[in-house]
Image (cartoon, rainbow, N blue to C red):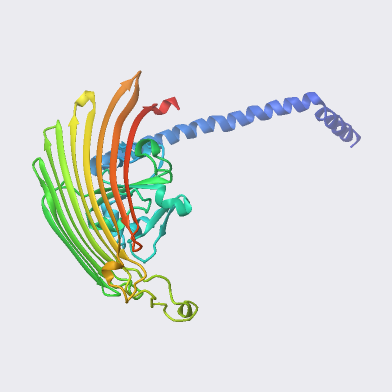
Amino acid sequence: MPGARFMGADVEKYFASPGCALCILLITLVFLTFFCVFPARRTFAQENQIVTDTQEKAETSSEEYPLFKMDEMVITATREPDIIKKVPKNVSVITAEDIAMAPSNSIVDLLSREANLNLRSMFGNDKKAGLDIRGMGDTFVSNVIVMVDGFKLNPPDMAGPDFSTIPLDQVERIEIVRGAGSVLYGNGAVGGVINIITKKGYRKPAFKAYNSYGDYNTYDGRFSFGGRVENFGFNFGFSYYDSNGYRDNNYFRKKDGTLALDYSLRDFLEISGNCLIHKDNVGFPGSLPYDEAYSGSKRESTRYPEDFGETEDYRYQGAVKLKLKQFGNILGKIGYRDRDNPYLLGYNPQIPIKEQLSKIEEETVEYSVKYNLDFGTWGYQHKFQAGFDYYDTDYLRESTKKERKYRDVTTREWFLYSELEFPGHFL
């Protein structure tokens, strides 16, 4: 027993020495290396075998059931077709399939569902409605550019674009670019750009019709006929919308007719043209009567049962594109717009209606020329654009006070754009 105690004391003294502690640490590391690293290598090899088997199964499955995935294209951010994941901006795309599945019956209702797009509507429809991108506040009408097939919809008086002149059933896709785009689109593109592309004749000729009826005697009817025959494409559409609205004198009626034609000459020349005719009539209910505003009623009445507005809008556009292959492309556009907008605010039964009418007349001519070239530079992809935009607008506004305001606004814009794409491994 004493010997045992002596041996135990020596053992405790020996294991308590620094040299023994270091030896134990080294032995522990060796065992950990042997039991952890080598099994891990074996496991890694097994995982490689599993991954290889999975890849073989996936390849076999893809051969039996091939999958096709197309890169989504966007054209607004750089004014040229590009893959959306390569565009250094926040971009959203609404396709024709998305529009068909959405319950919206107007452009503004559809766009207001997107992130950071806030709807501002005065009458519950797309007339006099606007979209605020990224919190521009009360200046949103002058800080968001709306393009329709390359034609700027914003008027020179900064009243905001009239979304009611765009028939929803004729929209092929909508591209929303958030953030400044003044270099490529000029003044007003501070909050963002909304580019609306209408339908062209792409597929086999087909006829489509749509009819619906809802609350407040709302009727929505549309039909279109379009397609492509060899190198010639065409699309014709007509729509009619009629609604009494929720309140008294809250009606809205509009008619739209569109025609788009295009012709391709081999791979060298593309010629296209389109026109739109829009007519509408809208009631202005104004503010609620004071007593009804604070009552528990449905708040349907109006103090201005005779106030109204009318709009006739005619837009024509033509484009020619030259494809010079390795020498780039040249695109030329010309557009014309004629808008007539009479309206009545503050009806007085003692004065004839014709003497109470105010009106806005706008006549705009647009020219645009753009050159683009894609080429390689020292192994990197390079994109270059140069262009010129010209707008000339004759604007007239007459009020009931016999005030006549006329302005001839001319805008000239030049731009240069260069983009160098680095390969993925560079980053």
Report the residue at 48% width, 53% height from top.
Answer: 137
Task: Answer yes or no: is residue 417 visible.
Answer: yes
Q: Quadrant of residue 97?
A: bottom left
Image coords of residue 95 (percent x, y): 29, 50
Report the residue at 28% width, 49% height from top.
Answer: 173
Query: In the rendered view, does 78 fall on the left or right side of 364?
Result: right
Tell me if residue 139 comes above or below residue 311 in the rendering. above
Task: Answer yes or no: is residue 105 visible.
Answer: no
Residue furthest toward the front? 402
| In front of the other: 110 or 146 | 146
Report the residue at 39% width, 38% height from top.
Answer: 182
| In front of the other: 162 or 426 | 162
Tell me if residue 347 comes above or below residue 394 in the rendering. below
| In front of the other: 240 or 327 | 240
Please identify the quadrant where the N terminus is shown: top right
Image coords of residue 197 (percent x, y): 26, 47
Residue furthest toward the left? 229
Please identify the quadrant where the C terminus is shown: top left
Q: Quadrant of residue 287?
A: bottom left
Image coords of residue 361 (percent x, y): 27, 54
Tell me if residue 220 comes above or below residue 47 in the rendering. below
Image coords of residue 101 (percent x, y): 29, 59
Q: How many marks?
A: 0
Query: In the rendered view, does 26 fall on the left or right side of 292?
Result: right
Residue furthest toward the right? 2
Residue furthest toward the top? 378
| In front of the other: 51 or 123 | 123
